[in-house]
């Protein structure tokens, strides 16, 4: 393995971690920065989301222009009103580099999400990364939720397929 491949892999792993940490903290602008400006988030059964603003709007439930701190405060107030301590933890496993060139990386991985109910949902990511400056960013992410708890606090009902 050449040194550029090791560097690319580590930068990609850092982007993957940033995506999960930012998402768990509801820091949607930071999460969106893990995508290329015109990056695509495609969730099985839904229309693809193109661009950072569309991704923020979807994940923020319609508040693309909003402030992350305001969204987090509203989410916390909602949790406190329900008497539940909100927790979200994405765990990424079995990251497999399917292809790695200097221009593109294709990855496959599994995710599980734990919330205040316990195991909330799990599934797979299929990613395409490209180098942007010193970083490797997500050009396209396909999300397939394979299972969700009946009382999932996050995952929309999945479509069989």
Image: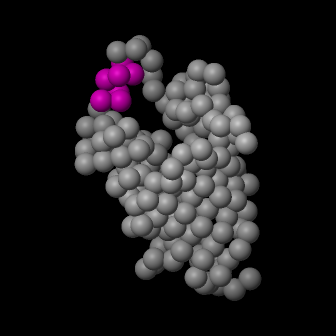
Q: Position of residue 3 (x, y in %)?
A: 65, 84
Point out the image quarter for the N terminus: bottom right
Q: Where is residue 81 in the image (x, y as percent from the top left)?
A: 35, 15
Q: Where is residue 44 in the image (x, y as percent from the top left)?
A: 61, 47
Examine the image and state in which quarter residue 130 appears.
bottom right
Q: In the image, is residue 151 part of the stretch drawn in magenta?
A: no
Examine the image and state in which quarter residue 5 appears.
bottom right
Residue at the spot x=73%, y=42% of the render?
A: 161
Whether residue 11 is visible here, answered yes or no, is no
Q: Is residue 71 above or below residue 149?
A: below
* Residue nearer the viewer, 58 or 84: 58
Residue at the spot x=56%, y=34% of the render?
A: 155
Magenta span main SS: helix
Q: Does residue 159 appear to the left or right of 139 in the view shown?
A: right
* Residue nearer the viewer, 46 or 69: 46
Whether residue 51 is visible here, answered yes or no, is yes
Tell me the magenta residue range.
74-80
* Residue nearer the viewer, 37 or 109: 37
Q: Does residue 93 appear to the left or right of 32 in the view shown?
A: right
* Residue nearer the viewer, 84 or 98: 98
Count of numbered labels shown in the rendering: 0
Q: In the image, is residue 76 part of the stretch drawn in magenta?
A: yes
Q: Where is residue 125 in the image (x, y as percent from the top left)?
A: 64, 53
Q: Is residue 109 above or below residue 84?
A: below
């Amino acid at each position: 393995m050449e040194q550029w491949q090791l560097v690319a892999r580590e930068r990609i792993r850092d982007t993957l971690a940033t995506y999960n940490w930012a998402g768990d903290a509801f820091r949607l602008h930071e999460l969106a920065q893990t995508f290329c400006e015109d990056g695509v988030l495609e969730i099985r059964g839904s229309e693809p989301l193109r661009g950072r603003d569309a991704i923020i709007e979807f994940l923020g439930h319609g508040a693309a222009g909003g402030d992350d701190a305001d969204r987090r405060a509203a989410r916390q107030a909602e949790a406190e009103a329900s008497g539940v301590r909100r927790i979200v933890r994405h765990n990424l496993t079995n990251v497999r580099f399917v292809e790695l060139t200097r221009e593109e990386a294709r990855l496959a991985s599994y995710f599980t999400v734990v919330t205040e109910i316990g195991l909330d949902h799990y599934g797979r990511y299929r990613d395409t990364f490209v180098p942007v400056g010193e970083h490797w960013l997500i050009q396209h992410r396909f999300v397939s939720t394979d299972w969700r708890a009946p009382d999932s606090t996050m995952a929309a009902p999945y479509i069989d397929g």
